[in-house]
Amino acid sequence: MTDRKPRPRPVPQKPTTKGSVSNENGSKTPCEFSSRCGGCTQVHIPYGEQLKRKQSAVEKLLSGICKVEPILGMSDPWHYRSKVHAVIGTDFKTKQPVSGVYQRGTHRVVPVQGCLIEDPRADRIIQTIVGMIPRYKLRIYNENTHRGFLRHVMVRTGHHTGQIMVILVATASEFPGGKAFVAELTEKHPEITTVVLNVNQKETSMVLGSRDYALFGPGYMEDELLGKRFRISPQSFYQVNARQTEVLYQTAIDLANLTGKETLLDAYCGTGTIGLCASDRVQRLIGVELNADAVRDAKVNAKLNRVTNADFICEDAGRFMVRLAKEGRTPDVLIMDPPRSGSDERFLRSVLTSGPKTIVYVSCNPETLARDARFLVKGHYTAVKAVPVDMFPHTEHCECVMLLQRDAAPGSQSS
Ligand code: SAH
């Protein structure tokens, strides 16, 4: 584990690729696609101002609960997205293949190139693929008729390893001309380390289907966070902003104040990333996660890093917490990172029953964080402080880490 500290407050920089244009509301924006794409709702606001707004929004939500430290923003808030998804469609006017996003509420693909938040390596690969489509006579999927072959391209890039996984989402596992297609693609982009064919035959808005076939390379990629290596399969959840994920995890681990003697429960652990990054600093790590694929990845990740003090359990976090509380097995430290909807009462009640000394709540939604923190504070916890972390510049989302500590029971010694 490295002792990388969270970055200092940001020095906002200008995007490198485009000048500013006016959006449909008449305000200046550096992105010409923002109003149609709908992803970066804040891109017209200077980055420093975005951070101020996020800071005050979090302060407002957490007022009366705890103090809020200054938000940790990015020094360079552009091109941070490591998972890039492009819909493949046909241009309405030119009838040529295009990549982009669906125009809101329609099946029409709005071409997007040179996105300011996505990794530019992904953009270049997607443009190459679009250019190759006519020569290989790939039939583009039509959302209205549900016919055609190629639906989406997803590119995932490793921040530290530089590995790149290209996922071609298609309606069939037979890919006529596939070998030559992949040979040309990987020759043009030697930086690609694996190409996967994902089959999605469903009439659904879900991008990925359940079947993956490796066409080139191992069928997965790896990246590193805080000195630990993680396997990323096409279906794996992995934070999309690796630079800020390290800031987020380091903040959470620092707040947990680990000494090496603790049992750490990483609840809602996904592929085990937070817990494994902290595993050198605890005696025992238990991860709990509902998604079986993520648990399988977490076990692989533990092996990959030769972590031997970790167990990963596939169960609803609330049920697991109830069991721990009943058995009187209290973790010393709980790091919890629930989805946007927050935790549930069953989980939080069992936290109050079992009473870990320290809770570090990692939240991607300050509203549900405020709700859950109030519940814990009404029990016997004190919310000490919260640190907002900007994982998604130019969007309205804000991540937040909160430290809560168990109050000393009356008559007991506080340590
Ligand atoms: N800590 C991880 C993942 C956070 S995302 C990381 O930083 O990468 C939230 C995770 O909670 C998802 O993996 C989701 O599958 C899991 N989850 C959602 N509901 C759950 C529940 N009731 N019990 C356990 N895990 C749950």
Image (cartoon, rainbow, N blue to C red):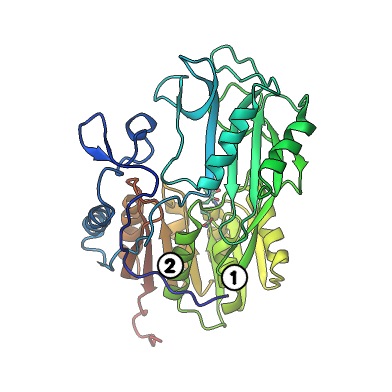
- Answer with left or right where residue 269 lies relative to residue 148: left
Q: Amino acid at mark 2?
A: Val
- Counting from the top left corner in percent of width and height, residue 75 is at 37, 62
> Which residue: 35% across, 85% down?
411
Residue lying at the far top in this picture: please name it.
145
**Which residue carries the number 1 mark?**
227
- Counting from the top left corner in percent of width and height, residue 259 is at 52, 83
> Above or below — where is 386 with respect to 242?
below
> Which residue: 31% across, 44% down?
43
Residue nearest the observer in this picture, 135 or 343:
135
Label 1's element?
Answer: loop
Residue nearest the observer in this picture, 344 or 170:
170
- Counting from the top left corner in percent of width and height, residue 35 is at 32, 31
Q: Which picture quadrant has residue 30?
A: top left
- Answer with left or right where residue 25 lies relative to residue 146: left
Residue nearest the observer in this picture, 130 or 197:
130
> Above or below — where is 158 with respect to 141?
below
- Counting from the top left corner in percent of width and height, residue 347 is at 47, 56
Residue nearest the observer in this picture, 261 or 69:
69
Label 2's element?
Answer: strand
**Which residue carries the number 2 mark?**
360
Q: Is residue 357 visible?
A: no
> Above or below — where is 269 with respect to 2?
above
